[in-house]
Image: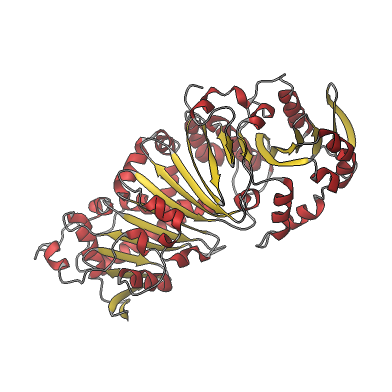
Amino acid sequence: MRSRSLAAVALIFVMFSGCTCGDKDAKKGPAPSELLKSLPRAAVSRPSALVPKAVLDSPRSMVVAAADARGTWEAFLRTAPGKALVEGRAIEHVSLSAQMERLLSFSHDLASASEHPLAADRLAEALSGPAAIGVVDGDDEDAELVLVKEVDGSQEFVVRLALMVSTVKGSGVSAKQHEGHSLLELRRGSRTLYVAAFQNVLIASTDEELAKAALSLALDKGGESVESIAGYKKEVDKLQGHRLAALMSLEPDGPPALLLGLSRLVLGLDVDSGQLQLGGELSDSPDTVAAFRALAYVPKDAVLFSSLGAANAEAFLERLGDAGGNNASVKDVRKALVLPAELEDALTDEAFYGLLGVSDTRFNHLLGLGLKDGAAAAKAFPKLAKNWLDEPGKRDVAPGVSAFCNSTEGLCLALAKDYLLAATDLESLKAAVETGLGKRPALSDVKGFQQVGKSGDTRFLTAYVDTARAADAMLTFFRAVGREQSQGFDTGDVDASVAPLCEAMKKLPPYGGGLAVDGTVVAGQFQPLQGQ
Protein backbone atom coordinates (compact mmCIF):
# COMPACT_ATOMS: atom_id res chain seq x y z
CA MET A 1 0.00 0.00 0.00
CA ARG A 2 2.71 2.45 0.96
CA SER A 3 4.24 2.18 -2.48
CA ARG A 4 0.89 3.18 -3.97
CA SER A 5 0.71 6.31 -1.82
CA LEU A 6 4.30 7.26 -2.65
CA ALA A 7 3.57 6.64 -6.32
CA ALA A 8 0.58 8.97 -6.15
CA VAL A 9 2.82 11.77 -4.85
CA ALA A 10 5.43 11.12 -7.54
CA LEU A 11 2.73 11.05 -10.18
CA ILE A 12 1.77 14.65 -9.47
CA PHE A 13 5.27 15.77 -10.41
CA VAL A 14 5.60 13.42 -13.37
CA MET A 15 2.23 14.55 -14.68
CA PHE A 16 3.14 18.22 -14.68
CA SER A 17 6.54 17.41 -16.17
CA GLY A 18 5.08 15.72 -19.23
CA CYS A 19 1.39 16.53 -19.53
CA THR A 20 0.07 17.11 -23.06
CA CYS A 21 -3.13 18.85 -22.00
CA GLY A 22 -4.02 22.51 -22.36
CA ASP A 23 -4.08 25.06 -25.16
CA LYS A 24 -0.75 26.56 -26.24
CA ASP A 25 -2.44 29.65 -27.64
CA ALA A 26 -3.85 31.40 -24.59
CA LYS A 27 -6.74 33.76 -25.22
CA LYS A 28 -5.86 37.40 -25.66
CA GLY A 29 -7.16 39.82 -23.07
CA PRO A 30 -6.25 41.30 -19.70
CA ALA A 31 -3.13 40.01 -17.94
CA PRO A 32 -3.78 36.90 -15.82
CA SER A 33 -2.69 38.71 -12.66
CA GLU A 34 -5.37 41.36 -13.28
CA LEU A 35 -8.06 38.72 -13.83
CA LEU A 36 -7.04 36.92 -10.66
CA LYS A 37 -7.66 40.08 -8.61
CA SER A 38 -11.39 39.49 -9.01
CA LEU A 39 -11.04 36.53 -6.63
CA PRO A 40 -11.05 36.93 -2.84
CA ARG A 41 -7.93 36.29 -0.78
CA ALA A 42 -7.77 33.31 1.55
CA ALA A 43 -7.19 34.05 5.23
CA VAL A 44 -4.67 31.16 5.32
CA SER A 45 -2.57 30.22 2.28
CA ARG A 46 0.23 28.03 3.64
CA PRO A 47 -0.35 24.70 1.83
CA SER A 48 0.40 22.32 4.70
CA ALA A 49 -1.98 24.30 6.93
CA LEU A 50 -4.81 23.57 4.48
CA VAL A 51 -4.45 19.78 4.29
CA PRO A 52 -7.21 18.52 6.61
CA LYS A 53 -6.22 16.30 9.51
CA ALA A 54 -9.08 14.04 8.37
CA VAL A 55 -6.68 12.74 5.71
CA LEU A 56 -5.01 10.78 8.52
CA ASP A 57 -8.23 9.10 9.67
CA SER A 58 -7.24 6.25 7.39
CA PRO A 59 -4.21 4.15 8.39
CA ARG A 60 -3.29 4.24 4.70
CA SER A 61 -2.50 7.89 4.22
CA MET A 62 0.34 10.34 3.87
CA VAL A 63 1.02 14.05 3.48
CA VAL A 64 3.97 15.67 1.70
CA ALA A 65 4.78 19.39 1.67
CA ALA A 66 7.56 21.34 -0.06
CA ALA A 67 8.73 24.95 -0.11
CA ASP A 68 9.33 24.64 -3.85
CA ALA A 69 7.62 21.61 -5.34
CA ARG A 70 9.04 21.91 -8.84
CA GLY A 71 12.54 22.83 -7.70
CA THR A 72 12.64 19.98 -5.16
CA TRP A 73 11.54 17.43 -7.77
CA GLU A 74 14.17 18.61 -10.24
CA ALA A 75 16.83 18.61 -7.50
CA PHE A 76 15.87 15.05 -6.57
CA LEU A 77 16.31 13.91 -10.17
CA ARG A 78 19.89 15.26 -10.01
CA THR A 79 20.74 13.16 -6.92
CA ALA A 80 22.17 9.65 -7.10
CA PRO A 81 18.83 8.00 -6.11
CA GLY A 82 16.98 10.19 -8.62
CA LYS A 83 19.40 9.31 -11.40
CA ALA A 84 19.02 5.63 -10.47
CA LEU A 85 15.23 5.88 -10.83
CA VAL A 86 15.60 7.53 -14.24
CA GLU A 87 18.33 5.16 -15.42
CA GLY A 88 16.36 2.20 -14.08
CA ARG A 89 13.29 3.45 -16.00
CA ALA A 90 11.17 3.63 -12.84
CA ILE A 91 9.97 7.12 -13.82
CA GLU A 92 9.10 5.81 -17.26
CA HIS A 93 7.02 2.98 -15.77
CA VAL A 94 5.22 5.44 -13.48
CA SER A 95 4.30 7.51 -16.53
CA LEU A 96 2.58 4.45 -18.05
CA SER A 97 0.63 3.44 -14.93
CA ALA A 98 -3.14 3.46 -14.42
CA GLN A 99 -2.80 6.15 -11.72
CA MET A 100 -0.91 8.33 -14.19
CA GLU A 101 -3.70 7.89 -16.72
CA ARG A 102 -6.20 8.98 -14.08
CA LEU A 103 -4.23 12.12 -13.19
CA LEU A 104 -3.66 13.02 -16.82
CA SER A 105 -7.41 12.73 -17.32
CA PHE A 106 -8.04 15.15 -14.44
CA SER A 107 -5.57 17.70 -15.85
CA HIS A 108 -7.16 17.39 -19.29
CA ASP A 109 -10.63 17.80 -17.76
CA LEU A 110 -9.55 21.07 -16.13
CA ALA A 111 -7.91 22.45 -19.26
CA SER A 112 -10.80 21.54 -21.55
CA ALA A 113 -13.39 23.07 -19.21
CA SER A 114 -11.51 26.30 -18.47
CA GLU A 115 -11.78 29.66 -20.19
CA HIS A 116 -8.03 30.11 -19.60
CA PRO A 117 -6.31 26.75 -20.15
CA LEU A 118 -2.64 26.64 -19.35
CA ALA A 119 -0.24 25.55 -22.07
CA ALA A 120 0.97 21.99 -21.58
CA ASP A 121 4.66 22.89 -21.62
CA ARG A 122 4.13 25.40 -18.80
CA LEU A 123 2.43 23.13 -16.27
CA ALA A 124 5.73 22.17 -14.63
CA GLU A 125 6.53 25.85 -14.05
CA ALA A 126 3.14 26.21 -12.39
CA LEU A 127 4.34 23.95 -9.57
CA SER A 128 7.09 26.39 -8.58
CA GLY A 129 6.78 27.49 -4.97
CA PRO A 130 5.04 26.04 -1.89
CA ALA A 131 2.67 23.07 -2.32
CA ALA A 132 1.29 20.17 -0.31
CA ILE A 133 -0.56 16.97 -1.11
CA GLY A 134 -2.56 14.54 1.04
CA VAL A 135 -3.16 10.99 -0.17
CA VAL A 136 -5.72 8.54 1.27
CA ASP A 137 -5.26 5.04 -0.12
CA GLY A 138 -8.15 2.57 -0.17
CA ASP A 139 -7.97 -1.22 -0.32
CA ASP A 140 -9.27 -1.64 -3.85
CA GLU A 141 -10.28 1.85 -4.91
CA ASP A 142 -8.29 4.71 -6.40
CA ALA A 143 -6.48 6.88 -3.88
CA GLU A 144 -8.26 10.07 -2.81
CA LEU A 145 -6.16 13.22 -3.17
CA VAL A 146 -6.18 16.76 -1.87
CA LEU A 147 -3.67 19.14 -3.49
CA VAL A 148 -2.96 22.66 -2.24
CA LYS A 149 -0.80 25.15 -4.15
CA GLU A 150 0.12 28.59 -2.85
CA VAL A 151 -0.21 31.33 -5.48
CA ASP A 152 2.51 33.96 -5.80
CA GLY A 153 1.36 36.86 -7.97
CA SER A 154 4.90 37.38 -9.23
CA GLN A 155 5.09 33.87 -10.77
CA GLU A 156 3.26 34.04 -14.09
CA PHE A 157 2.51 30.38 -14.62
CA VAL A 158 1.44 29.77 -11.04
CA VAL A 159 -1.05 32.61 -11.56
CA ARG A 160 -2.16 31.05 -14.85
CA LEU A 161 -2.75 27.71 -13.11
CA ALA A 162 -4.96 29.40 -10.51
CA LEU A 163 -6.81 31.25 -13.28
CA MET A 164 -7.39 28.00 -15.16
CA VAL A 165 -8.85 26.38 -12.04
CA SER A 166 -11.06 29.35 -11.22
CA THR A 167 -12.68 29.61 -14.67
CA VAL A 168 -13.90 26.06 -15.34
CA LYS A 169 -17.50 26.05 -16.60
CA GLY A 170 -19.87 24.39 -19.04
CA SER A 171 -21.16 20.84 -19.25
CA GLY A 172 -20.38 18.73 -16.19
CA VAL A 173 -19.42 21.73 -14.06
CA SER A 174 -21.53 22.88 -11.13
CA ALA A 175 -20.88 25.50 -8.46
CA LYS A 176 -21.62 24.96 -4.77
CA GLN A 177 -21.32 27.41 -1.93
CA HIS A 178 -19.34 26.44 1.16
CA GLU A 179 -18.69 28.92 3.94
CA GLY A 180 -19.63 31.70 1.49
CA HIS A 181 -17.07 30.68 -1.14
CA SER A 182 -17.55 28.89 -4.45
CA LEU A 183 -16.55 25.22 -4.67
CA LEU A 184 -16.61 23.99 -8.26
CA GLU A 185 -17.47 20.37 -9.03
CA LEU A 186 -16.19 18.99 -12.34
CA ARG A 187 -17.62 15.65 -13.50
CA ARG A 188 -16.34 13.68 -16.46
CA GLY A 189 -17.69 10.11 -16.64
CA SER A 190 -16.66 8.32 -13.44
CA ARG A 191 -14.17 11.06 -12.52
CA THR A 192 -15.05 13.90 -10.14
CA LEU A 193 -12.79 16.77 -9.11
CA TYR A 194 -13.55 19.59 -6.67
CA VAL A 195 -11.65 22.86 -7.02
CA ALA A 196 -11.58 26.22 -5.26
CA ALA A 197 -9.39 29.21 -6.11
CA PHE A 198 -8.29 32.37 -4.32
CA GLN A 199 -5.85 35.09 -5.23
CA ASN A 200 -3.24 33.47 -3.01
CA VAL A 201 -4.00 29.72 -3.00
CA LEU A 202 -5.81 27.03 -4.95
CA ILE A 203 -7.30 23.75 -3.74
CA ALA A 204 -8.15 20.59 -5.71
CA SER A 205 -9.48 17.30 -4.36
CA THR A 206 -11.08 14.10 -5.58
CA ASP A 207 -13.15 13.95 -2.37
CA GLU A 208 -15.88 16.48 -1.61
CA GLU A 209 -15.54 16.34 2.18
CA LEU A 210 -11.77 16.85 2.03
CA ALA A 211 -12.28 19.74 -0.39
CA LYS A 212 -14.78 21.39 1.96
CA ALA A 213 -12.52 20.87 4.97
CA ALA A 214 -9.57 22.43 3.12
CA LEU A 215 -11.76 25.34 2.04
CA SER A 216 -12.89 25.95 5.64
CA LEU A 217 -9.26 26.04 6.73
CA ALA A 218 -8.40 28.52 3.98
CA LEU A 219 -11.24 30.78 5.13
CA ASP A 220 -10.17 30.35 8.78
CA LYS A 221 -13.66 29.07 9.54
CA GLY A 222 -12.57 26.17 11.74
CA GLY A 223 -11.30 22.64 11.43
CA GLU A 224 -7.96 20.95 12.08
CA SER A 225 -5.09 20.63 9.65
CA VAL A 226 -2.18 18.21 9.70
CA GLU A 227 -0.12 21.02 11.25
CA SER A 228 -1.96 20.35 14.52
CA ILE A 229 0.40 17.38 14.88
CA ALA A 230 3.33 18.99 16.69
CA GLY A 231 6.05 16.82 15.20
CA TYR A 232 4.92 17.55 11.68
CA LYS A 233 4.55 21.28 12.29
CA LYS A 234 8.17 21.29 13.47
CA GLU A 235 9.30 19.79 10.14
CA VAL A 236 7.08 22.12 8.11
CA ASP A 237 8.65 25.12 9.85
CA LYS A 238 12.04 23.96 8.51
CA LEU A 239 10.88 23.99 4.89
CA GLN A 240 13.14 25.98 2.62
CA GLY A 241 15.10 25.28 -0.53
CA HIS A 242 14.88 21.67 -1.67
CA ARG A 243 13.43 20.16 1.50
CA LEU A 244 10.38 17.93 1.95
CA ALA A 245 8.24 17.35 5.06
CA ALA A 246 6.22 14.13 5.04
CA LEU A 247 3.77 12.56 7.46
CA MET A 248 2.67 8.92 7.22
CA SER A 249 -0.17 7.19 9.03
CA LEU A 250 0.88 3.58 9.70
CA GLU A 251 -1.25 0.46 9.61
CA PRO A 252 -1.75 -1.07 13.09
CA ASP A 253 -0.72 -4.54 11.88
CA GLY A 254 2.17 -3.33 9.69
CA PRO A 255 5.86 -3.91 10.55
CA PRO A 256 6.63 -0.34 11.80
CA ALA A 257 3.66 -0.39 14.18
CA LEU A 258 4.33 -3.93 15.44
CA LEU A 259 8.09 -3.52 15.81
CA LEU A 260 8.26 0.09 16.97
CA GLY A 261 4.85 0.88 18.44
CA LEU A 262 4.48 3.82 16.05
CA SER A 263 1.12 4.94 14.68
CA ARG A 264 2.51 7.88 12.68
CA LEU A 265 5.90 8.72 11.25
CA VAL A 266 7.25 12.19 10.43
CA LEU A 267 10.02 12.59 7.86
CA GLY A 268 12.04 15.58 6.74
CA LEU A 269 14.26 15.10 3.69
CA ASP A 270 16.98 17.50 2.61
CA VAL A 271 17.18 16.49 -1.05
CA ASP A 272 20.54 18.16 -1.72
CA SER A 273 22.44 16.47 1.12
CA GLY A 274 20.50 13.20 1.12
CA GLN A 275 19.95 13.45 4.89
CA LEU A 276 16.61 12.07 6.08
CA GLN A 277 15.24 13.40 9.37
CA LEU A 278 12.74 11.10 11.10
CA GLY A 279 10.45 11.54 14.06
CA GLY A 280 7.38 10.00 15.62
CA GLU A 281 5.45 9.42 18.81
CA LEU A 282 5.19 6.11 20.65
CA SER A 283 2.37 4.82 22.79
CA ASP A 284 4.78 4.16 25.67
CA SER A 285 8.15 5.51 26.72
CA PRO A 286 10.74 2.90 25.61
CA ASP A 287 14.20 2.09 26.82
CA THR A 288 17.29 3.00 24.84
CA VAL A 289 19.78 0.33 23.88
CA ALA A 290 23.44 0.20 22.91
CA ALA A 291 23.45 1.45 19.36
CA PHE A 292 26.17 -0.82 18.04
CA ARG A 293 26.27 -3.89 20.34
CA ALA A 294 24.12 -6.01 18.05
CA LEU A 295 26.30 -5.24 15.04
CA ALA A 296 28.81 -7.83 16.23
CA TYR A 297 26.25 -10.60 15.55
CA VAL A 298 25.14 -9.52 12.09
CA PRO A 299 27.27 -10.63 9.09
CA LYS A 300 28.81 -7.76 7.16
CA ASP A 301 27.10 -8.90 3.96
CA ALA A 302 23.61 -8.44 5.46
CA VAL A 303 21.02 -6.64 3.35
CA LEU A 304 19.28 -4.80 6.20
CA PHE A 305 19.77 -4.32 9.94
CA SER A 306 17.76 -2.60 12.64
CA SER A 307 18.52 -2.52 16.37
CA LEU A 308 15.44 -1.67 18.40
CA GLY A 309 14.80 -0.41 21.89
CA ALA A 310 11.01 -0.75 21.74
CA ALA A 311 10.89 -4.26 20.27
CA ASN A 312 11.63 -6.05 23.51
CA ALA A 313 9.98 -9.45 23.59
CA GLU A 314 7.17 -8.65 26.04
CA ALA A 315 6.08 -5.39 24.35
CA PHE A 316 6.42 -6.81 20.84
CA LEU A 317 4.33 -9.88 21.62
CA GLU A 318 1.73 -7.71 23.35
CA ARG A 319 1.43 -5.60 20.19
CA LEU A 320 1.06 -8.76 18.12
CA GLY A 321 -1.88 -9.78 20.29
CA ASP A 322 -3.49 -6.34 20.09
CA ALA A 323 -2.91 -5.82 16.34
CA GLY A 324 -5.89 -4.31 14.59
CA GLY A 325 -6.86 -4.70 10.96
CA ASN A 326 -7.72 -7.92 9.18
CA ASN A 327 -4.35 -9.63 9.39
CA ALA A 328 -5.38 -12.91 11.01
CA SER A 329 -1.93 -14.41 10.47
CA VAL A 330 -0.41 -11.85 12.85
CA LYS A 331 -2.65 -13.01 15.70
CA ASP A 332 -1.96 -16.65 14.82
CA VAL A 333 1.76 -15.92 15.13
CA ARG A 334 1.14 -14.31 18.53
CA LYS A 335 -0.67 -17.42 19.79
CA ALA A 336 2.22 -19.59 18.69
CA LEU A 337 5.02 -17.45 20.17
CA VAL A 338 4.64 -18.14 23.87
CA LEU A 339 7.64 -17.22 26.01
CA PRO A 340 8.27 -19.23 29.20
CA ALA A 341 8.01 -16.89 32.19
CA GLU A 342 11.54 -17.69 33.33
CA LEU A 343 12.88 -16.74 29.89
CA GLU A 344 11.01 -13.42 29.88
CA ASP A 345 12.78 -12.55 33.13
CA ALA A 346 16.13 -13.30 31.49
CA LEU A 347 15.62 -10.91 28.55
CA THR A 348 16.56 -7.23 28.27
CA ASP A 349 14.55 -4.54 26.49
CA GLU A 350 16.75 -4.89 23.41
CA ALA A 351 16.15 -6.63 20.11
CA PHE A 352 17.50 -6.51 16.60
CA TYR A 353 16.40 -7.64 13.16
CA GLY A 354 18.51 -8.52 10.14
CA LEU A 355 17.65 -9.52 6.59
CA LEU A 356 20.58 -11.67 5.53
CA GLY A 357 19.49 -12.40 1.97
CA VAL A 358 16.91 -13.89 -0.35
CA SER A 359 16.87 -17.46 -1.64
CA ASP A 360 14.41 -17.67 -4.53
CA THR A 361 11.14 -16.41 -2.94
CA ARG A 362 12.27 -17.05 0.65
CA PHE A 363 13.62 -14.22 2.77
CA ASN A 364 16.36 -15.18 5.23
CA HIS A 365 15.40 -13.41 8.47
CA LEU A 366 17.42 -13.10 11.67
CA LEU A 367 16.04 -11.92 15.02
CA GLY A 368 17.98 -11.34 18.24
CA LEU A 369 16.55 -10.77 21.75
CA GLY A 370 18.98 -9.34 24.31
CA LEU A 371 19.96 -11.44 27.35
CA LYS A 372 20.73 -10.26 30.87
CA ASP A 373 20.82 -13.68 32.56
CA GLY A 374 22.48 -16.28 30.35
CA ALA A 375 22.18 -19.08 32.90
CA ALA A 376 18.42 -18.61 33.33
CA ALA A 377 17.98 -18.39 29.58
CA ALA A 378 19.92 -21.61 29.04
CA LYS A 379 17.71 -23.38 31.57
CA ALA A 380 14.51 -22.20 29.85
CA PHE A 381 15.79 -22.69 26.30
CA PRO A 382 14.60 -26.32 25.80
CA LYS A 383 11.11 -25.32 26.93
CA LEU A 384 11.09 -22.43 24.45
CA ALA A 385 12.12 -24.78 21.64
CA LYS A 386 9.26 -27.11 22.55
CA ASN A 387 6.78 -24.18 22.50
CA TRP A 388 7.92 -22.72 19.19
CA LEU A 389 8.97 -25.77 17.14
CA ASP A 390 6.81 -28.66 15.98
CA GLU A 391 9.51 -31.32 16.25
CA PRO A 392 12.58 -29.65 17.75
CA GLY A 393 15.78 -31.20 16.49
CA LYS A 394 19.16 -30.36 17.98
CA ARG A 395 21.97 -29.13 15.70
CA ASP A 396 25.58 -28.17 16.50
CA VAL A 397 26.34 -24.81 14.85
CA ALA A 398 29.65 -23.89 16.54
CA PRO A 399 31.90 -25.25 19.33
CA GLY A 400 29.83 -25.10 22.50
CA VAL A 401 26.74 -23.69 20.74
CA SER A 402 23.76 -25.85 19.81
CA ALA A 403 20.61 -24.93 17.96
CA PHE A 404 17.08 -26.28 17.82
CA CYS A 405 15.25 -26.36 14.46
CA ASN A 406 11.80 -27.47 13.41
CA SER A 407 11.33 -30.39 11.05
CA THR A 408 11.77 -28.27 7.89
CA GLU A 409 14.54 -26.06 9.34
CA GLY A 410 12.25 -23.11 8.57
CA LEU A 411 12.77 -21.82 12.11
CA CYS A 412 15.96 -22.33 14.13
CA LEU A 413 16.89 -21.05 17.61
CA ALA A 414 20.21 -20.69 19.39
CA LEU A 415 21.58 -19.06 22.55
CA ALA A 416 24.66 -16.88 22.09
CA LYS A 417 26.50 -14.92 24.78
CA ASP A 418 24.43 -11.75 24.45
CA TYR A 419 21.33 -12.76 22.48
CA LEU A 420 18.68 -15.36 21.95
CA LEU A 421 18.88 -15.79 18.17
CA ALA A 422 16.12 -16.95 15.83
CA ALA A 423 16.46 -17.43 12.08
CA THR A 424 14.29 -18.77 9.27
CA ASP A 425 17.03 -21.13 8.06
CA LEU A 426 19.92 -22.95 9.67
CA GLU A 427 22.63 -21.32 7.53
CA SER A 428 21.55 -17.81 8.60
CA LEU A 429 21.56 -18.84 12.25
CA LYS A 430 25.02 -20.43 11.88
CA ALA A 431 26.30 -17.27 10.18
CA ALA A 432 25.08 -15.10 13.08
CA VAL A 433 26.60 -17.39 15.72
CA GLU A 434 29.96 -17.50 13.92
CA THR A 435 29.89 -13.73 13.44
CA GLY A 436 29.29 -13.24 17.17
CA LEU A 437 32.29 -15.47 17.87
CA GLY A 438 34.48 -13.32 15.62
CA LYS A 439 34.85 -15.94 12.90
CA ARG A 440 33.18 -13.82 10.19
CA PRO A 441 33.28 -10.10 9.30
CA ALA A 442 30.46 -8.23 11.07
CA LEU A 443 28.51 -5.03 10.49
CA SER A 444 30.60 -3.55 13.29
CA ASP A 445 33.42 -3.53 10.73
CA VAL A 446 31.52 -1.08 8.50
CA LYS A 447 33.55 2.12 8.77
CA GLY A 448 30.75 4.31 7.48
CA PHE A 449 28.86 3.95 10.74
CA GLN A 450 31.40 6.31 12.29
CA GLN A 451 29.49 9.06 10.47
CA VAL A 452 26.25 8.41 12.35
CA GLY A 453 27.45 7.63 15.86
CA LYS A 454 30.22 6.36 18.09
CA SER A 455 30.79 3.37 20.29
CA GLY A 456 28.88 3.65 23.57
CA ASP A 457 25.92 5.57 22.10
CA THR A 458 22.50 4.52 23.32
CA ARG A 459 19.45 4.96 21.13
CA PHE A 460 15.93 3.85 20.47
CA LEU A 461 16.84 2.57 17.00
CA THR A 462 19.91 2.09 14.81
CA ALA A 463 19.51 0.95 11.20
CA TYR A 464 21.58 0.10 8.14
CA VAL A 465 20.74 -0.91 4.56
CA ASP A 466 23.19 -2.05 1.91
CA THR A 467 21.53 -0.61 -1.19
CA ALA A 468 23.43 -2.77 -3.67
CA ARG A 469 22.61 -6.00 -1.83
CA ALA A 470 18.99 -4.87 -1.42
CA ALA A 471 18.83 -4.43 -5.21
CA ASP A 472 20.25 -7.94 -5.71
CA ALA A 473 17.73 -9.36 -3.24
CA MET A 474 14.83 -7.63 -4.97
CA LEU A 475 15.89 -8.89 -8.38
CA THR A 476 16.39 -12.44 -7.08
CA PHE A 477 12.92 -12.43 -5.54
CA PHE A 478 11.07 -11.11 -8.59
CA ARG A 479 12.88 -13.46 -10.96
CA ALA A 480 11.95 -16.39 -8.75
CA VAL A 481 8.31 -15.30 -8.62
CA GLY A 482 8.25 -14.90 -12.39
CA ARG A 483 9.85 -18.30 -12.86
CA GLU A 484 7.95 -20.36 -10.28
CA GLN A 485 4.59 -18.73 -9.67
CA SER A 486 1.67 -17.61 -11.81
CA GLN A 487 1.52 -13.88 -11.08
CA GLY A 488 0.81 -12.51 -14.55
CA PHE A 489 4.48 -11.89 -15.42
CA ASP A 490 7.56 -13.95 -16.25
CA THR A 491 11.33 -13.51 -16.03
CA GLY A 492 11.31 -11.65 -19.34
CA ASP A 493 9.01 -9.02 -17.84
CA VAL A 494 11.30 -8.77 -14.80
CA ASP A 495 14.40 -8.33 -16.94
CA ALA A 496 12.65 -5.59 -18.91
CA SER A 497 11.24 -3.65 -15.96
CA VAL A 498 12.76 -4.50 -12.56
CA ALA A 499 16.30 -5.41 -13.64
CA PRO A 500 17.28 -1.95 -15.00
CA LEU A 501 16.21 -0.30 -11.73
CA CYS A 502 18.10 -2.87 -9.64
CA GLU A 503 21.25 -2.43 -11.71
CA ALA A 504 21.04 1.34 -11.25
CA MET A 505 20.47 0.97 -7.48
CA LYS A 506 23.69 -1.03 -7.16
CA LYS A 507 25.61 2.19 -7.77
CA LEU A 508 24.16 3.81 -4.63
CA PRO A 509 26.03 3.82 -1.29
CA PRO A 510 24.75 2.09 1.87
CA TYR A 511 22.57 4.19 4.20
CA GLY A 512 22.61 4.28 7.98
CA GLY A 513 21.55 6.25 11.02
CA GLY A 514 19.51 6.15 14.20
CA LEU A 515 16.74 7.57 16.35
CA ALA A 516 17.05 8.96 19.87
CA VAL A 517 14.10 9.09 22.26
CA ASP A 518 12.84 11.71 24.70
CA GLY A 519 9.87 10.35 26.64
CA THR A 520 7.59 9.05 23.93
CA VAL A 521 9.01 11.25 21.14
CA VAL A 522 11.64 9.79 18.81
CA ALA A 523 13.84 11.75 16.41
CA GLY A 524 17.00 11.24 14.40
CA GLN A 525 18.46 11.07 10.92
CA PHE A 526 19.69 8.71 8.20
CA GLN A 527 22.25 9.49 5.54
CA PRO A 528 24.48 7.95 2.87
CA LEU A 529 27.53 6.18 4.29
CA GLN A 530 30.72 6.90 2.40
CA GLY A 531 34.12 5.28 2.64
CA GLN A 532 32.94 1.73 2.07
Residue at the left extreme of this rendering: 29
Whether residue 432 is visible: yes
Is residue 171 placed above or below 483 in the rendered structure?
below
- The colour mode here is secondary structure
10 and 256: which is toward the camera: 256
The quarter of the rendered structure image containing the N terminus is bottom right
Farthest residue in the front direction?
519
Closer to us: 422 or 476: 422
- Tell me: 187 left or right of 509: left
The residue sitting at the top extreme is 439
Answer yes or no: is residue 23 visible: no
Image position, residue 132 (x, y; %): 36, 57
- Foreground of the two, 517 or 61: 517
Residue 315, horizontal then vertical, whole percent: 70, 51
Q: Is residue 44 above or below residue 307?
A: below
Residue at the spot 50% in from the left edge and 31% down from the top edge: 452
Q: How many marks?
A: 0
Residue 465: % across, % down: 56, 34
Q: Is residue 142 left or right of residue 371?
A: left
Quadrant of the rendered image containing residue 71: top left
State the image quarter where residue 432 is shown. top right
Identify the residue at image location x=15%, y=68%: 37
Residue 52 rendering spot, x and y as whole percentages: 41, 66
Q: Height in image: 208 above or below 18?
A: below
Q: Is residue 22 left or right of residue 133?
A: left
**Left or right relative to 271: residue 448:** right
The residue located at (22%, 57%) in the rendering is 158
